[in-house]
Image (cartoon, grey):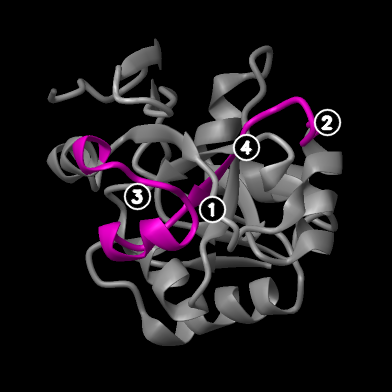
Amino acid sequence: MLIKIYPENPNPREVAKVVKVLRDGGLVVYPTDTVYAVGCDALNVRAVERICDLKGVNPQKSNLSIICYDLSNISEYAQVSNAAFKLLKRNLPGPFTFILPTSSRLPKVYRNRKEVGIRIPDNEIVRSIVRELGNPILTMSVRDEDEVVEYTTDPELIHEKYVGVVGLVVDGGYGGVEASTVVNCVDDVFEVVRQGKGELLL
């Protein structure tokens, strides 16, 4: 299913359709402030395993990233020092992934790595979905390094590729091609480990 949601004013009825798929353990594709991504309810272990399998990711060896609605609920899922909180507050919402130590609230599949990526995209569509769901979304880019850019920016082409694989694709307009900037905040020596779209304000 492909549904249109406008970023300026996401329609609650359409957002509810996306949330229903997520609550039922399904996968969805949605826009962010960087690239289109595929995600699931981050607290649904079976759905997390499905998405890792789909993307060929071993959660024992790779950091997983979640999208939160705002700063107020990050501390439920990650340990945030005062210095890290100030850094996040200066840069979020925005095109960043901040690597933080996990909290006990996250399922064991995350805690095996002891770190989790935190995102709060500057995109009202995905943030509305997360707010309505009440849980963070596990998120992975639809694009692999060697894939054609056009299909990963056009929601109709993404839908053609993922039909039968995900429960729903959100058409939020054309997506970007540049990934988020990744910042390691595990200790208070902050390090940009991948420069992407975001310019970090220290």
170 magenta-colored: no
Q: Estimate the x, y position of residue 10 in percent, counting from the top left.
A: 33, 72
Left or right: 130, with 39 as reference point: left
Rate crowding at label 2 as few (under 14), some (14 to 19) or many (20 or more) other CA atoms within 10 Å.
few
Q: Pointer 4 and pointer 1: residues touching (CB < 8 Å)?
A: no
Q: Looking at the image, is 125 positioned above or below residue 51?
A: below
Q: CA distance from mark 4 to mark 1?
A: 8 Å
Q: Nearer the viewer, mark 1 or mark 2?
A: 1
Q: CA distance from mark 2 to mark 4?
A: 20 Å
User: Which structural element holds mark 2?
Assistant: loop
Q: Amino acid at mark 1?
A: Ser
User: Which structural element holds mark 3?
Assistant: loop
User: Which structural element holds mark 4?
Assistant: loop
Location of mark 1 (residue): 103
Location of mark 4 (residue): 114
User: Is tag 4's residue or tag 1's residue first in the polypeptide sequence?
Assistant: 1
Q: CA distance from mark 3 to mark 1?
A: 18 Å
Q: Nearer the viewer, mark 3 or mark 1?
A: 1
User: Is tag 3's residue or tag 1's residue first in the polypeptide sequence?
Assistant: 1
Foreground of the two, 32 or 139: 139
Q: Estimate the x, y position of residue 127 in percent, counting from the top left.
A: 37, 63
